[in-house]
Image (cartoon, helix red, strand yellow):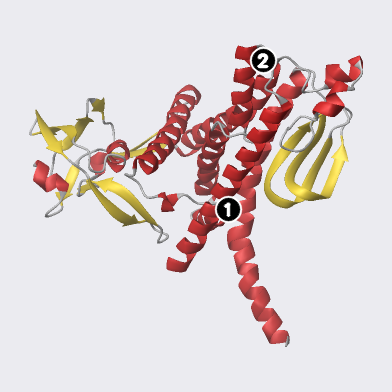
Amino acid sequence: MSMDIWGILNTYGGWLVGYLVPFLFVLTIVVFFHELGHFLVARWCGIKVVAFSIGFGPEIVGFNDRYGTRWKIAAVPLGGYVKFFGDDNAASVPDLEAAASMSESEKRDSFVHKPVGSRAAVVAAGPIANFILAIVIFAGVFMIAGKQTTSARVDAVQTGSAAQAAGFKPGDLVLAINGQTIASFSDMQRIVSISAGEPIEVTVERGGVPVTLKAKPELKEIKDNFGNVHRLGVLGISRSMAPGDIKTEKVGPLRAIVMGTQETWFVVDRTMSYLGGVIAGREAADQLGGPIRIAQVSGQVATAGFTALIHLTAVLSVSIGLLNLFPIPLLDGGHLLFYGIEAIRGKPLSERAQEMGFRIGLAIVVMLMIFATFNDILHLATS
């Protein structure tokens, strides 16, 4: 009996430390800063914040600050919320009946009675905080670790590949793709990976002379170091690892911020390109993942070290910020959509219209979560 219990603890204890702890570390940071954005702008706008919660459900631990806000950690650590005075629930759905009976002093503290511009600023602050967090993390990584780059020089060309068909040769140095300057091999990979099946114009330096090549990257399944499969566009070339083609440069604060912003924009652009491909039928939707996939990836990345895990935190922060901006009622983007309509009409949508909108939004979010979880389970079963 004792050996069985020890075996169970050993098995699940390893899973707990290896996957759950990195997952909660990453998710808690992202959620905290998202909600902190809402919280700080709400305070700035004179809105009373009733609760700041990391997680949902029953409270595990918490305290009240001097402004009356209840800061707490809840039992279900899959998100969080800031509840404002006048909200009916954690999704910031207004309690219109209670709002109508408020005194003048209560209205000054109420979210629902603030001008539409203030409410929009509070809602937008969450996703914006996620983007700022990502920029700061990326910039910090660049400043501490520097930037290691490998020149976009071709070492070898695979037989039968798109690169061979296009006329690439070993020793070619890629200078530009579709007019965009290429400074490193990773710059080239980023463009090629999202260009599967699309013709691209590549300018290379060959023997000191610029040569223009026409190529069409092939869509292939690539396994990463953890065995995860990714479908990406590839040319079929390998990079040069010669000493002169590898360099690490120190990055100052200002340049690090610029690079962090560029890295953040790349994640946004790559995400939107993928979603556009799913809608157009060019990409498979099975790459969409939920909490299980995030936990798995967090555990895998944690084995590569803290820098890799904090880098994943930045990527997830961008993804959460972007997701929340989608114009789906219940998400921040849905609230912003309602506020935009209110600003145009000069008055809010009817209570009935808002209620229907939130119900539709809830249905969409639940369906997306079910679909993502199904993908996660399928991914685990086939990996």
Q: Quadrant of the N terminus?
A: bottom right
Q: Position of residue 236 (x, y in %)?
A: 20, 49
Picture disc at residue 117: 2
Q: Nearer the viewer, mark 2 or mark 1?
A: 2
Tally of numbered discs = 2
Quick check: marks 2 and 1 in contact, CB under 8 Å? no
Residue 169 visible in image: no
Q: CA distance from mark 2 to mark 1?
A: 33 Å
Q: Amino acid at mark 1?
A: Pro
Is 3 on the left-hand or right-hand side of 295? right
Q: Is residue 204 rendered to the left or right of residue 65?
A: left
- Residue 382 location, quadrant: bottom left
Q: Which mark is residue 261?
A: none
Where residue 279 sits in the image (x, y, percent)?
Answer: 39, 40
Q: Which residue is rendered at x = 51% and y = 58% of the image? A: 374
Residue 277: image quadrant is: top left
In the displayed orientation, state which residue is furthest to the front.
352
Relative to residue 71, is residue 358 drawn left or right? left
303 to the left or right of 231: right
Q: Give the label on residue 291, or none.
A: 1
Residue visible at 77% across and 22% down in the picture:
112
Taking depth in this image into account, of 338 and 260 the one nearest to the observer is: 338
Task: Tell me the kind of residue under disc 2.
Answer: Gly
Q: Earlier in the sequence, mark 2 or mark 1?
A: 2
Residue at figure coordinates x 35%, y 46% from the top left: 283
Q: Residues within 10 Å of mark 2 (few under 14, many from 20)?
A: few
- The crowd level at tag 1 (other Cα within 10 Å; few <14, some 14-19, many 20+) is some
